[in-house]
């Protein structure tokens, strides 16, 4: 069955992770939030794994943020 044997479960996981990323992005400040940046990066990595994407592939978010948060 391969990587996608639990497709419905992966969709649920992805949805939850995207909501967590959205919340984490709302907590970013100009200073002293490096740990939040790290957490966001790890969560994005996990979404890429679940979607079967490569590391350089951008994730499309329903909220339209994509990687814009990195410009803060």
Image (spheres, helix red, strand yellow):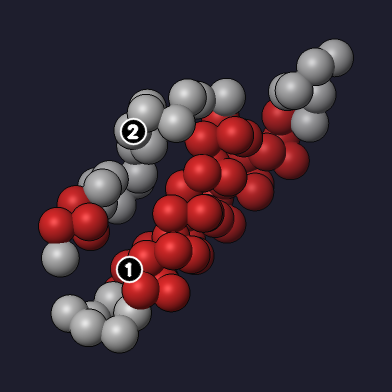
Give the side of residue 18 with respect to residue 8, left or right.
left
* Residue closer to the observer: 2 or 12: 2
Element type where label 1 sits in the image: helix
Q: Is residue 37 left or right of residue 3?
A: left
Q: Position of residue 22 (x, y in %)?
A: 38, 63
Whether residue 32 is visible, yes or no, is yes
Q: Is residue 21 left or right of residue 42?
A: left
Which residue position is annotated with label 2? 58
- What is the crowding at mark 2: few (fewer than 14 residues within 10 Å), some, or many (at least 20)? few
> Horizontal placement of 20 versus 72: left or right?
right
Q: Where residue 43 sits in the image (x, y, percent)?
A: 52, 54
The residue carrying mark 1 is 25
Q: For the N terminus, which image quadrant? A: top right
Locate residue 66: give its quadrant: top left
| 41 relative to 66, above or below | below
**9, above or below 2, in the image:** below
Residue 10 in picture, x, y percent from top left: 68, 38
SS at circle 2: loop
Name the image quarter holding residue 31. bottom left
Query: How many angstroms separate mark 2 from mark 1 (CA)?
Result: 17 Å
């Amino acid at each position: 069955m391969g990587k996608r044997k639990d497709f419905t479960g992966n969709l649920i996981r992805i949805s939850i992770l995207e909501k967590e990323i959205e919340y984490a992005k709302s907590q970013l400040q100009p200073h002293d939030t490096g740990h939040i940046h790290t957490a966001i990066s790890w969560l994005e990595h996990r979404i890429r794994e679940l979607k079967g994407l490569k590391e350089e592939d951008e994730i499309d978010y329903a909220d339209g943020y994509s990687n814009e948060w990195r410009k803060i």
